Amino acid sequence: MTGTGGPPSAVVAGTDEVLGAVPAYERLLTAVERRRADAFLAPAPRADFVAAHVLVRLCAARLLGRPADSLVLEQRCPGCGSDEHGRPGLAGLPQVSVSLSHTTGVVAAAAGLAPVGVDVERRTLPDSVRGAAGRVLSAAERAAMRGHADPDAYFLRQWVRKECFVKLGRATLGGLAAVDLSGLPDGSGGPSPGPSRHGDLYVLDHTDPRRDAVAAVVSTARPRIGAAVPPTDPAHPADLGRSI
């Protein structure tokens, strides 16, 4: 089946919502993914990992107009050659960019024909993350955070944006403070009507009060983000798909 493509599209959903929408979801995973999933000692983190890896297939399937079980997700580290980590991609489809993220009970994924990165975090920040502001934020961002009505919310917004930059290869985890996003909207004025621009990139913010989560999607093309779990087979959306 030939897909229609379109702009990069991301989805934020609850872990249970994704797994509940896809019976026999384990069959979509590769042996490597199942081995990595089984390495989690607790069931909840394992479910988050699996749901993110299922959701990214559903996003790509919708983009390409083909069944999710026809897509093979792979990762390869350019440094060590390991298939246990590294930027994700689809086997045999180098023109398709995919990205995924998971946190406690919430997952996000994106797919597009332009480079795309997505990240999601819960809105309640652990102290370990809050204390990272000094090495994550630029000097201008730290000043803005100090004067912000909700410093945690400001930090979290920049955190998820910068995680997307890392996934796009536009930043490194050790160099996040060198990326200055202080010129972007901080979210205090309410939901943004569309993406902001940072150089050649579109930065689209997403707040999900229902799932107590904040997300961002960044791409070289204008992205979209929503909360409807795509079907496993775009030709039969009534079988497995449902709106959230």
Image (spheres, rainbow, N blue to C red):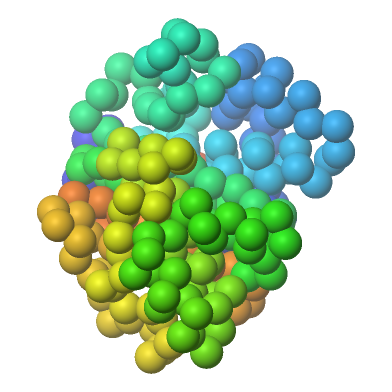
Give the x, y percent position of residue 95: 21, 29
Q: Residue at x 63, y 15 (%)?
A: 31
Give the x, y percent position of residue 48: 68, 45
Q: Which residue is drawn at 55% across and 84% down?
A: 150
Q: Which residue lies furthest to the right in this view?
A: 42
Q: Which residue is drawn at 20% across and 43% down?
A: 114
Q: Which quadrant is home to the C terminus? A: bottom right
Near-viewer residue (58 or 89): 89
- Quarter of the view holding residue 123: bottom right
Give the x, y percent position of residue 202: 22, 60
Near-viewer residue (192 or 10): 192
Q: In this view, does 98 lie to the left or right of 104?
A: left
When the figure is inspected, residue 231 is found, relative to residue 113, above or below; the finding is below
Q: Can residue 241 be seen in this view?
A: no
When the figure is inspected, residue 21 is found, relative to residue 233, above or below; the finding is below
Q: Which residue lies furthest to the left in this view?
A: 200
Count of numbered tags: 0
- Quarter of the view holding residue 27: top right
Near-viewer residue (77 or 129): 129
Q: In this view, does 20 lie to the left or right of 167?
A: right
- Quarter of the view holding residue 89: top left
Give the x, y percent position of residue 229: 51, 57
Q: Residue at x 68, y 23 (%)?
A: 36
Q: Is residue 223 visible?
A: yes
Q: Which quadrant is home to the N terminus? A: top left
Q: In this view, does 1 lie to the left or right of 190?
A: left
